[in-house]
Image (cartoon, rainbow, N blue to C red):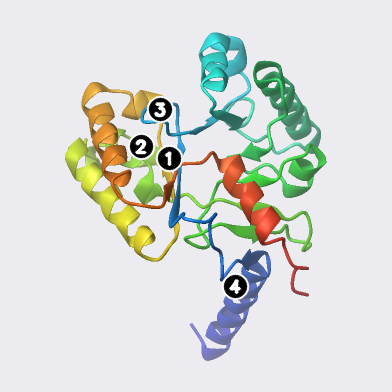
Amino acid sequence: MTVIDLDQQLVELRSAADAYAARHQFIPDLTWPQGVRIAVNFTCDFDVHGVKATIFTPGRICELYPEALRAVVESGHEIADHMWEHRVPEEPALEEDHLAKTVAALERIARRRPVGTRSSHSAALLRKYGFIYRSEGSADQRPYYEYDEGGGNGLVNLPMHYVIDDAMYFNFNWLGTDASAQRITDPERVGDIWWAAFRQQYNVGGYLNVCMHPFQSGRALRIAMLDRLIGRMKTLPGVWFPTCEQVARHCIDRYPPLAPAE
């Protein structure tokens, strides 16, 4: 590799990094409602200790398990978009068809349109259908605003990270990893990792998004671990367990987005 080739690659990397940074707007002085030190989103179907969760569900699930989702809504939880068939089509017309069907299906169950998603649907399309937040990616530890490549269509992003994702510990062959390289992790070890992540963010007045799947965490030993973890969190003052929508609306109301940088 010549010096010229290396210099060109560095220029391209800096350009890509600058473009990525321009799409994100952090909230440096983010604080929570009075008396709250940390906001913790449980994004799963897990009903215990008065914790409100956000359930990201594919639209087709509304056809397969409508009673289960109605029970989620009746318990005060939020249901949000997780694509129609757990994928985002590349064809624009089909992508919109999938999102429109999911919005209609979730609205029939919840009697209100969803405002959040965990997907890679385009920001412009999400804004068209009334979405205000996305929960995917981790450009920062705390909620932030994210824009599309053109600098518009801003959404609140509620960051999630695979370290706080049960599938990384309880599932073989996750994200295409070779199964032989994975091991089922002791739930107590996972509880320790998540507690450490919680305490770090609690100490700085931050945010935690715990991502779970019913077919992963919905086992007796793992449910018992989650019960102990939530109980432990509740022993500390100022811990808020809102839905993702509540966090997103708090950010928009208290810290409205600035015009994105040119």
Secondary structure, mark 2, is helix
Mark closest to the chain's N terminus, 3 or 1 = 3
Percent coordinates x, y for residue 47 in the rendering: 41, 25
Q: Which of the 4 quarters of the picture holds residue 182?
A: top left
Above or below, 199 relative to 91: below
Percent coordinates x, y for residue 10 in the rendering: 56, 81
Give neighbour class at mark 1: few <14, some 14-19, many 20+ (Cα, 10 Å): many
Q: State how far apart marks 3 and 4 are (Cα).
A: 38 Å
Asked whether the beta carbons under mark 3 and mark 4 sit within 8 Å of each other, the answer is no
Mark closest to the chain's N terminus, 4 or 2 = 4
Percent coordinates x, y for residue 240 in the rendering: 45, 46
Mark closest to the chain's N terminus, 2 or 3 = 3
* Residue type of the residue flagged with mark 3: Phe
Q: State how far apart marks 4 and 2 are (Cα).
A: 29 Å
Report the quarter where the C terminus lies.
Answer: bottom right
Asked whether the beta carbons under mark 2 and mark 1 sit within 8 Å of each other, the answer is yes
The residue that appears at 56% across and 70% down in the rendered structure is 29
Q: State how far apart marks 2 and 3 are (Cα).
A: 15 Å
Q: Mark 4 against mark 2, which lies toward the viewer?
A: 2
The residue under label 4 is 17
